[in-house]
Image: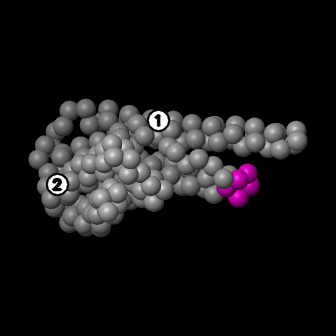
Amino acid sequence: MLRHLPNLITGLRVLLVWPVYWLILNSEFKLALLLAAVAGISDAVDGFLAKHFGWQSRLGGLLDPLADKLLLLAGFSALTMIGAIPVWFFALVIGRDVLIVCGAVAYHNLIGAFDAQPSKLSKLTTVVQILFVLEELLRLAWLPDIPGRQLLLLLSAALTLISGLHYVLVWSLRARRTLHERKSR
């Protein structure tokens, strides 16, 4: 029974998406920051439990990144709607994710099954994006003049762009190699 605990925690994290979004839109930044922090802690806890006790599952492997993406989407879209972050940055983040999903669907349909494990660069990008959302909530809740805000925005944008290009390159080369191997047979 405990084996399903990480998935339950991840499911609860998904349930925090709408409240975080709503709280940001309604300028309840302190509570939004608190819920976002709870979501971040729950992400660490479910990951620890899954790895430490061997409670990893295919469902958890799909739910965990989905929960992260939904929370980031909620945070970025709400922060963009209230004018806290630039539209170009939101478009870059969404564009990268759409590119990855479309590439994965195309690869699956044209080439075959693939390993959906995120790259280390993608994981770093997600961490920096999460830090940026938390920084923005902290800025809006308590500290209007956080030093390094612009640097964190630019770092997050650069990593988003680079990791998107990295996925395109890696999966294009993998598709080319697979097609070449099929022709060689």
Residue 120 image label: 1
Label 2: which secondary element: helix
Q: Is residue 73 visible?
A: no
| 44 w.r.t. 108: above or below | above
Determine the residue located farthest toward the front in the rendered image: 1
Q: Is residue 5 magenta?
A: no
Q: Position of residue 115 (x, y in %)?
A: 59, 47
Q: Position of residue 25 (x, y in %)?
A: 25, 64
Image coordinates for residue 16, horizontal then vertical, percent: 27, 63
Q: How many marks?
A: 2
Residue extent of the magenta highlight: 108-112
Who's the residue at 32% across and 32% down the image? 151
Q: Give the mark, 1 or 2, whose residue is nearer the N terminus.
A: 2
Query: The disc labelled 2 sits on which kind of residue?
Result: Leu
Q: Secondary structure at mark 1?
A: helix
Lateral position of residue 16 relative to residue 31, left or right: right
Residue marked by disc 2: 34
